[in-house]
Amino acid sequence: MRVGTGYDLHRMVEGRPFYLGGVIIPSEKGEEAHSDGDVLLHALIDAVLGSCADGDIGSHFPPEDDKWKDADSRMLLKAVLDDTKAEIINIDATVFLERPKLRPHVDEVRESLAALLGLDITAVSLKAKTAEGCLGELGTGDAVAAAVTILVK
């Protein structure tokens, strides 16, 4: 058994969709990123790679490579899972976002993660936290962050 942790942070900007765990969340802003910007899947990818001591998302999918421009993070996750052969036992994730409120979308995102990972939904935990108006761009709603811990067999 191994443990992996991952973290990602993106600025939120108008004119982009907001992806979270493979789900498009209704929002006036979305992640500014080279790929689709899904912070939750990016943190999950880093957790998988960390559990295998195999670098990070940037070393596998460099942002300066146009091949990954607007890439679907679900496909990046699939590629990492195929390459590492990691068998995830469970996932515990936290998303830090001022708005939109995530509570109405938590179960849909958990279902998406469970499907992407081939897990029962009871093995997928997702918590949503705000910065309560502080911590710079996270507190103003101009950024989103995600932290993920996984157990891998």
Image (spheres, helix red, strand yellow):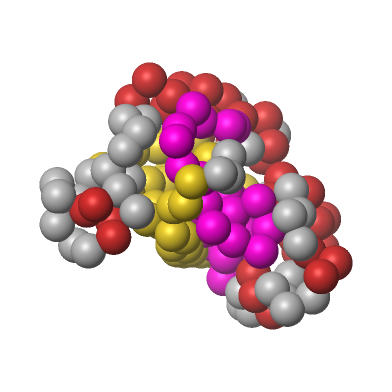
Most foreground residue, 20 or 123: 20
Please report the residue visible at 42 percent of the width from the left and 27 percent of the height from the top. Answer: 106
Which residue is painted at 73% across and 78% down in the image? Answer: 64
- Give the quarter of the figure containing the C terminus: bottom right
Residue 76 visible in the current orientation: no
Residue 44, image x and y in percent?
56, 54
Magenta span contains residue 48: yes
Q: Which residues are magenta?
A: 23-50
Task: Tell me: 65 left or right of 91.
Answer: right
User: x, y percentage for residue 3?
Assistant: 49, 62
Residue at 27 percent across and 43 percent down: it is 98
Which residue is nearer to you in this view: 75 or 29?
29
Q: How many marks?
A: 0
Residue 102, above or below 133: above
Q: Quadrant of residue 84?
A: bottom right
Residue 109, placed above or below residue 63: above
